[in-house]
Amino acid sequence: MKSILATIVALGQVYLLMPLTAMADVPMNLTDANTSLGEIGNTTGMGGAEDLTTVIGNLINVVLGVLGIIFLVLVVYAGFLYLTDQGGGEKAKKAMKLLTTAVIGIVIIVAAYAISNYVIGAMVAVTT
């Protein structure tokens, strides 16, 4: 049994360390490569430059998404503190304070998202 397992592990390591080759059509010069990449970008909708409002909107969405993840981590941590209090009351008070702060924070984040969405929409409406 051990020899079969050792053989499987050894063959698995050989397979993972073996270089993989791809049969790809290589463009003949740099102009062909740029043309091919441009066609692929246009097909996927990522070919052209974006305007400033789109870039700012995407940046705001990323920042607010990260803040939402931080909120989720704080809520989970506060729940952990609350559940591991063991009747002392000190951790429970800290957990409730942290949870209250996190909820206030998410309310501010949602309000910021609504305001930024409205402002960017108004900017787009004015410029078009």
Image (tube, rainbow, N blue to C red):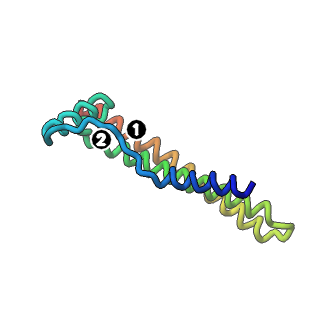
Residue displayed at 43% across by 45% down: 61
Give the percent coordinates (x, y) of residue 119. 36, 41
Quadrant occupied by the N terminus: bottom right
The quadrant where residue 71 appears: bottom right
Quadrant occupied by the C terminus: top left
Q: Nearer the viewer, residue 35 or 14?
A: 14
Mark 1 neighbour class, 10 Å CA radius: few under 14, some 14 to 19, many 20 or more: few
Q: Is residue 70 above or below residue 120?
A: below
Decide if residue 53 is on the left or right side of residue 20: left
The amino acid sitting under disc 1 is Tyr
2 or 1: mark nearer the eye: 2
Q: Secondary structure at mark 2?
A: helix
* Residue behind mark 1: 118
Give the percent coordinates (x, y) of residue 89. 81, 69
Task: Residue 53: give its label.
Answer: 2
Residue displayed at 67% across by 60% down: 77
Q: Secondary structure at mark 1?
A: helix
